[in-house]
Amino acid sequence: MPLSPSATRDLLGQLGHFPKRALGQNFLVDGNIVNKSLELAGVRPGDTVVEVGPGLGTLTTALLEAGVDLWAVEFDRNLHAHLEATILPRFPATFHLLQGDAVEHPLAGLPADRALAGFKVVANLPYAISTPWMDAVFSGPLPTNLVLMLQQEAAQRYAAKPGSKQFGAISIFLQSAYDIAPGHKVAAACFHPRPDVESYLLNLVRKPAPFVFAPEVKQLIRACFQQRRKQLGALLRDKLPDQGAAWIAELTAAGHGPQSRAEEVPVALWQKLTVPAA
């Protein structure tokens, strides 16, 4: 079970650790949410799981007790030392702990052959790294399932539909590879310190045939959304004269056209965009 808010405060005091807002250090203190995370991910004994930002080890311990082989990356040196001293000795064969930046190590050091064999991600993602971390993960190999604790605003952006202001490049990359399954709202009271916003467990299930964009196409899509009020015909005339014209013709055939803006184009049509090899 997770620590209570008072026990969490006491432990942080013993460690001489002050939660860092910039690192999204809001520690989960609700056992029901821990259990819900494992349930949504369909965690089973023997699963390979990646965790980002284990913090004090609440979710970490639950995953290890469920019998998974866990690969975790923690940026904070103080919290890493705590995990190394308290949890690693209990699970020396199944807990693989890395100190470092999750954006640089999105799979927490999971070996490539293990990743290709199949793995899941269960993580409490800090807001500041959520999009770059997901962008790195979506480059592959892709996890079969991800259950991500996110600020509700971020979860809404990733699940946004075309035509909405929240729809963006990361929405396209995510929805091309994953189906969004029912998740779970998480109240601010489930954390210590209590955040200013509500959170959400985003539940992602890999599509039977996931689509992964080439790096150069991702770069172009991002550029289109950076000028999201500009018409795509004008944007691509400058950035991609030949392939851009062919793609605009596809948009026109599908009921869109050169006057369309990036946020109006469905995910399936973005998958048809190509960029010539350098």
Image: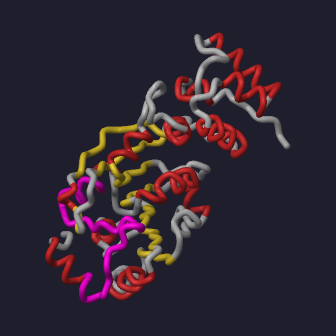
Kindly indicate the quadrant of the structure image that contains residue 235.
top right
Residue drawn at the location 29% of the way across and 55% of the way down? 37
Residue 165 lies left or right of residue 12; in this view the side is: right
What number of labels is visible? Answer: 0
**Whether residue 107 is situated above or below residue 213 in the rendered picture:** below
Residue drawn at the location 37% of the way across and 40% of the way down? 156
- Which quadrant would the C terminus be assigned to in this image? top right
- Between residue 225 and residue 267, name the one nearer to us: 225
- Between residue 195 and residue 202, name the one nearer to us: 195
Residue drawn at the location 53% of the way across and 42% of the way down? 170
Residue 27 lies left or right of residue 138; in this view the side is: left
Q: Where is residue 66 in the image (x, y as percent from the top left)?
A: 30, 65
Q: Position of residue 68 (x, y in %)?
A: 38, 65
**Whether residue 57 is situated above or below residue 177 in the rendered picture:** below
Q: Position of residue 216 (x, y in %)?
A: 72, 43
- Which quadrant would the N terminus be assigned to in this image? bottom left
Kindly indicate the quadrant of the structure image that contains residue 43.
bottom left
- Between residue 49 and residue 197, name the one nearer to us: 197
Q: Position of residue 8 (x, y in %)?
A: 21, 76
**Magenta stretch holds residue 100:** no
Residue drawn at the location 50% of the way across and 38% of the way down? 171
| Residue found at the far right of this picture | 278
**Magenta stretch holds residue 29:** yes
Give the extent of the magenta segment. Answer: 12-37
Q: Which colour scheme is used?
A: secondary structure
